[in-house]
Image (spheres, rainbow, N blue to C red):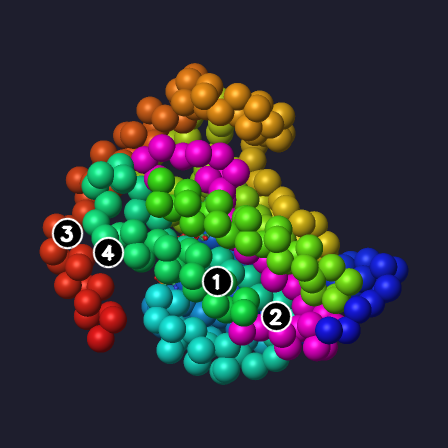
C-alpha cells in the first residue's frame, strides 16, 4: 500500500471536484437529486445510478444543462450481480457517494423478514460491497473519497425505525473504522448524518412534520454536507442546531434516552409515522412476491 506524507494527505483533502469521476447511488429522486445537482455545479463528471431509469434520465438532463458530463447506469443494489456490473461500467472512480437507502419505518413487530433483508442489504451490505470494489483501486492511485450518506439514526436510537437504525449505526461504525485503516493512503472516507429533511426524500414523503423542538432541515444542506466530506470532513451532522452535547448526554445516561426522546417529542412523531406507514403498505404477501420476483 502506498503511504503518503501528512502534508500531501491534507493537500489532497482540499479537493478540486472539477472533472472528478463521481458515482452517486440513489440519484433518481429525493436527496440524491440535490447531491447530483450540487456536484454538477462544481464540475464533477457524474455517474448516476438507481433502478428507475426514466427518473434517472430526468436528473441526468438537469445536470447536463448545468454543464456536467453525465453517465447513467441502472442497477438494483440489492443484487450482487448488479453491484458488480455497476462498478465495472462506472470505471475508475475518484469519488463514490453511497446515498441509496430504504427505510421501512414501522414497529419492529410489523417488519417482515423481507423488510429486514431489504434494509440490511440496500443500506449496509450494498455500500460495503461497493466500497470493497472501489477502495483497492483508489489506494493504488493514491487518491479517492467515499461519502456515506448515513443518518442521525446512526448516532442515536430511533424507535419505530429499528432496522433502519441498525443499518445506519453499521455504516457509521464501518466508515470510521476503515477511515483509520486508510490514513496516509490519500483515500478519505466520511459520513453525512441528516436529521429530518423537509421537501424531498423519505421523511418528507410520509407527510408527518418533525417535532417542534427538532425542526426540519433543507435538502440543500445535505448536498453541502456531501461537499464538506469530499473536502476533508469526517462526519457532518445535518441538524437544525448543535446536537453533539445531547448525544453525549444520551451516551452517558443510556437509561434516560427513552424519556429524553419522549420529552423532545420525537417518539410520538415516529409512532404516528409508523402507524401511517403500516396503514399505507400493501399486504406482506404482495411485498414478498415482489422481493421474490426481483431475486429472480
Ligand atoms: N430524507 C431524509 O429525511 C433522510 C434523513 C436521514 C438520512 N437519509 C438518507 O439519505 C439517503 C437518501 O434518502 P432519500 O430521503 O433521498 O430517500 P428516497 O427519496 O426514498 O430515495 C432513495 C433513493 O435510493 C434508491 N434506491 C432505493 N433502493 C434501491 C435499490 N435496491 N437499488 C438501487 N437504488 C435504490 C432510489 O432509487 P430507485 O427507487 O429508482 O432505485 C432513490 O433514488 C438514504 O441513505 C437515507 O437513509 C434521508
Quickly name the residue at label 2: 135
Q: Quadrant of residue 28?
A: bottom left
Which residue is found at the position 43% from the left and 49% from the top?
Answer: 167
- Residue 140 is covered by the magenta coloring: yes
Proximity of marks 3 and 2: CB atoms separated by less than 8 Å: no
The CA span between labels 4 and 3 is: 9 Å
Disc number placed over residue 284 in the picture, else none: 3
What's the distance in space between the residues labelled 4 and 2, CA to CA? 30 Å
Residue at numbered disc 4: 114
Q: Quadrant of the N terminus?
A: bottom right
Question: Ligand 1 near label 1 (Cβ, under 8 Å)?
Answer: no
Percent x, y of residue 136: 63, 74
Q: Which residues are magenta?
A: 133-161
Query: Is 14 in the magenta?
Result: no
User: Could you say where residue 87 lies in the image, as x and y percent from the top left?
Assistant: 50, 77
Question: Residue placed at 72% from the left, 70% from the top?
Answer: 143
Whether the residues at callouts 4 and 3 have beta carbons within 8 Å, the answer is yes
Numbered disc 3: secondary structure = helix
Q: Residues within 10 Å of mark 3 (few under 14, many from 20)?
A: some
Ligand 1: does it lie within 8 Å of the C-beta at label 2?
no
The span from disc 1 to disc 2 (Cα, nearest Å) is: 12 Å
Quarter of the image where one finds residue 39 = bottom right
- Between the C-alphas of marks 3 and 2, the distance is 38 Å
Which residue is identified by label 1? 127
How many neighbours does mark 1 have within 10 angstroms: few (below 14), some (14-19), or many (20 or more)?
many
Amino acid at each position: 500500500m502506498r503511504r503518503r506524507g501528512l502534508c500531501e494527505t491534507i493537500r489532497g483533502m482540499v479537493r478540486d471536484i472539477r472533472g472528478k469521476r463521481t458515482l452517486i447511488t440513489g440519484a433518481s429522486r429525493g436527496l440524491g437529486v440535490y447531491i447530483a445537482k450540487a456536484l454538477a455545479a462544481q464540475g464533477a463528471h457524474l455517474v448516476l445510478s438507481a433502478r428507475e431509469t426514466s427518473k434517472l434520465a430526468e436528473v441526468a438532463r438537469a445536470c447536463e444543462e448545468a454543464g456536467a458530463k453525465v453517465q447513467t447506469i441502472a442497477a438494483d443494489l440489492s443484487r450482487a450481480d448488479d453491484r458488480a456490473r455497476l462498478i465495472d461500467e462506472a470505471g475508475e472512480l475518484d469519488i463514490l457517494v453511497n446515498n441509496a437507502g430504504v427505510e421501512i419505518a414501522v414497529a419492529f413487530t410489523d417488519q417482515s423478514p423481507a423488510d429486514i433483508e431489504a434494509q440490511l442489504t440496500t443500506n449496509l451490505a450494498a455500500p460495503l460491497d461497493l466500497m470493497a470494489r472501489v477502495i483497492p483501486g483508489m489506494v493504488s492511485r493514491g487518491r479517492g473519497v467515499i461519502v456515506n450518506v448515513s443518518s442521525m439514526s446512526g448516532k442515536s436510537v430511533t424507535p419505530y425505525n429499528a432496522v433502519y437504525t441498525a443499518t445506519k449505526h453499521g455504516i457509521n461504525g464501518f466508515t470510521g473504522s476503515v477511515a483509520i485503516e486508510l490514513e496516509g493512503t490519500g483515500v478519505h472516507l466520511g459520513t453525512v448524518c441528516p436529521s429530518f429533511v423537509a421537501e424531498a426524500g423519505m421523511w418528507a414523503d410520509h407527510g408527518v412534520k418533525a417535532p417542534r423542538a427538532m425542526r426540519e432541515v433543507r435538502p440543500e444542506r445535505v448536498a453541502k454536507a456531501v461537499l464538506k466530506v469530499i473536502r476533508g470532513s469526517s462526519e457532518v451532522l445535518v441538524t437544525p442546531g448543535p446536537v453533539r452535547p445531547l448525544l453525549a448526554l444520551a451516551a452517558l445516561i443510556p437509561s434516560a434516552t427513552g424519556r429524553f426522546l419522549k420529552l423532545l417529542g420525537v417518539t410520538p412523531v415516529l409512532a404516528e409515522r409508523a402507524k401511517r406507514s403500516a396503514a399505507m403498505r400493501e399486504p406482506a404477501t404482495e411485498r414478498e412476491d415482489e422481493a421474490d420476483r426481483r431475486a429472480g
